[in-house]
Image: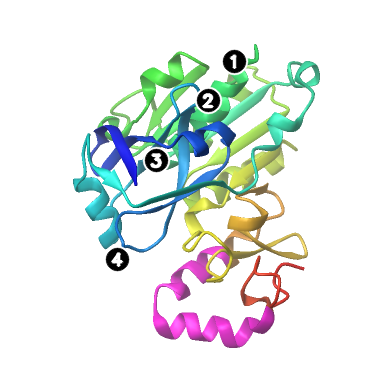
Amino acid sequence: MYKILYADKLAANIYRMVVEAPMVARRCEPGQFVIVRVNEEGERIPLTICDYDREKGTVTIVFQPIGASTLILADLGEGDFIEDFVGPLGRPSDLIEEDIEELKKKHIIFIAGGVGTAPVYPQVKWLHEHGITADAIIGAKNKDLVILEKEFREVCNLYITTDDGSYGRSGMVTTCLQDLIDKEGKQYDHCVAIGPMIMMKFVCKLTKEYDLKTIVSMNPIMVDGTGMCGACRLTVGDEVKFACVDGPEFDGHLVDFDQAMKRMTMYKTEEGREALRLKEGKTHHGGCGNCGGDK
């Protein structure tokens, strides 16, 4: 059992929890995720890690209630317990594997949309702790849906944009990025975009024009978190990958977003899932070591 030490509501339908999980916190790296099971009857929910504290032994998660299990999770509060909290899973951000001195020479821009703001935070925080100040764009539909602003301002140069212009700059995150480069003379060597699939698709379409390397996180398509369900199967370049075991981060310019979004739609129905299994055969799953999907 894992104790919830703190819980609050960041915005409409967006919740944050700090969970006591020392073994997970000890090994966490930016870019990874955990699998949460609220109770014995609950389903496995993959949730990205928003923050962690090795000394205190805590891990912070941010989520939106969508299904039954996340609705139950949202009703829990300080002092309550979660049945299972497994992790860290997935591959850490490539940035932490680079030489720090070489990393300091780069100009890095992060683009976050909606709940995707949460997994961006540990990356910009990690860079700040290593003497690197990145730029970050947070995009939201309106002012009330902007999350983690205070936390971001403490560790990076922050730009906020809202679709309706109610806060910060007006427009989409892509418009903000264009303005920074074309009108304000910013130059970037590396971009990380995390948010809704459609947002990441259009960010990558734009950054390809600038020849700006862009990493995306495919956590929105994860369901089981182990590769066994086949939900997060995607094509990266000419290879079949699984977001949960091979990612969740990939070269955004190589990801087939249209295919991934179509699979997400099909996977929501039993008929769609069966059609995918028939079409993809042995490559439908990944990570089990037996079906061939992990080859």
Going by the numbered disc 4, the residue's amino acid type is Glu
Q: How many marks?
A: 4
Q: Is residue 86 left or right of residue 82?
A: right
**Residue 153 is covered by the magenta coloring:** no
Q: Residue at x 74, y 32 (%)?
A: 97
Tell me which colouring the rendered structure shows.
rainbow
Q: CA distance from mark 3 to mark 4?
A: 29 Å
Res 41 label: 4
Q: Residue at x 40, y 41 (%)?
A: 115
Determine the secondary structure under disc 1.
Answer: helix
Disc 4 residue crowd, few under 14, some 14–19, many 20+, Cα 10 Å: few
Task: Give the number of the mark in front: 3 or 4.
Answer: 4
Task: Give the number of the mark in front: 2 or 1.
Answer: 1
Determine the secondary structure under disc 4.
Answer: loop
Going by the numbered disc 3, the residue's amino acid type is Gly
Res 129 label: 1
Residue range highlighted in magenta: 260-282
Task: Give the number of the mark in front: 4 or 2.
Answer: 4
